[in-house]
Amino acid sequence: MKIVVTGSLGNISKPLTKELVQKGHAVTVISSKAEKRKEIEALGATAAIGSLEDADFLSATFTGSDAVYCMLPPFDFFNPKLDFMAEARKLANNYAKAIQSSGVKQVVHLSSVGAHVEKGNGAIDFHFMVEHILRELPSDVAITHIRPVAFQNNLYAFTDFVKGKGFLEGFIGKILTLQHYGLISLIKGNKKGIILSNYGAKDIIPWVSPKDIASAITEELVTPFVGRKVRYIASEELTCNEVAGILGTAVEKPYLKWVMTTDKQMLSALKGMGLPLNLAQSLVDMNASMHTAKLFEDYYKNKPTLGKVKMKDFAKEFATAYNQ
């Protein structure tokens, strides 16, 4: 099959590209960075350098493909001029135009847990809108909406704090890597070993590895289907304290604990980092929806078979990054 992958060589798109190429498919990877061309080609794929902002570029790249994988890139939430809802709407409309004009009939879209409701999940509310824009495409376009849960990789945001660096020093650079609902958290590198957030402790959170997401996307891309469907992806369900214990053991800090703070305290900390009030509030609201499990209500009604990559597997990678 001829398959187009967006997302450059990110946490999902890189293992996805590898898996598709290994299965013998002709893969084109879209990236906005020309310097990624050699790395993309080294994987056995074709590089298409251009911007998701350019609907004509997307249409030309999609043309002749059997299937496409569409995702929205991480937003620069520290940009005070950013209207991320408007940006998400624009990119979703670009995808819809490109899909329709190119004639591609099979689409896999990376959405998010929480996309079953229009409002109430803070910073990820835009996923509901994006899904509905794509669902307005003609009925002969088959679409799978992939809804992953909390990313294991988002835990990398904790690395600097485990090492004992300060809130601003460690966290501002890390928040930009958070792709879906980001772990707006604080680790104090002291003898108590604390992770602080306005969710955590005994809260049970479903976690997912990008590798398990990539495998699920591969299945959806190479299996012909009709209509529209939603597929949740999860690897393991753990309390936040269990996560802290696994990561703490991996970095030889077995005393690491995950402590709840209040929404008000979290909002104050984010504002202190310089985030615009509306963004800070949306992140706090997102975390609060994790604490109440509202974010996961539809996931629990449609629980998938859990993936292969567990938190203990991820903890080995976390420890490697921690020790570098």
Image (cartoon, rainbow, N blue to C red):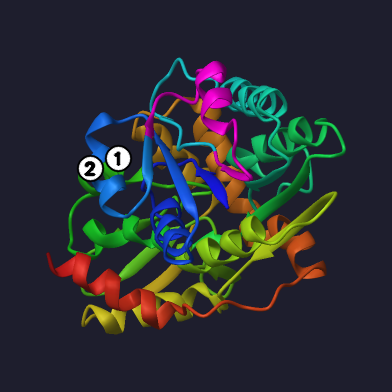
On the image, the x and y values in percent for residue 38 come to 22, 42
On the image, the x and y values in percent for residue 3 come to 54, 47
- Please give left or right for residue 272 compared with residue 83 in the image: left
- Please give left or right for residue 139 compared with residue 272 in the image: right
Residue type pointed to by label 2? Lys
| Residue lying at 31% horizontally and 46% vertically, measured from the top left | 40
- Please give left or right for residue 167 compared with residue 218 in the image: left
Q: Which residues are magenta?
A: 48-71
The answer to whether marks 2 and 1 mark residues whose Cβ atoms lie closer than 8 Å is: no
On the image, the x and y values in percent for residue 242 come to 47, 81
Image position of 123 with respect to 240: above or below: above
- Crowdedness near tag 2: few (<14), some (14–19) or many (≥20) residues, C-alpha within 10 Å: few
In the foreground, 170 or 321: 321
| Residue lying at 45% horizontally and 55% vertically, measured from the top left | 12
Is any atom of residue 251 visible in this view?
yes
Image quarter of the C terminus: bottom left
Q: What secondary structure is found at the residue carrying circle 1? A: helix
- Residue 172's disc number: 1
C-alpha gap between disc 2 and disc 1: 30 Å
Q: What secondary structure is found at the residue carrying circle 2? A: helix
**Residue 88 is covered by the magenta coloring:** no
On the image, the x and y values in percent for residue 276 come to 46, 25
Is any atom of residue 256 visible in this view?
no
Q: Disc 2 designates what residue?
A: 38
In the foreground, 271 or 209: 209
Q: Residue furthest left?
A: 324
Residue type pointed to by label 1? Ile
Q: How many numbered discs? A: 2
- Crowdedness near tag 1: few (<14), some (14–19) or many (≥20) residues, C-alpha within 10 Å: some
- Residue 251's disc number: none
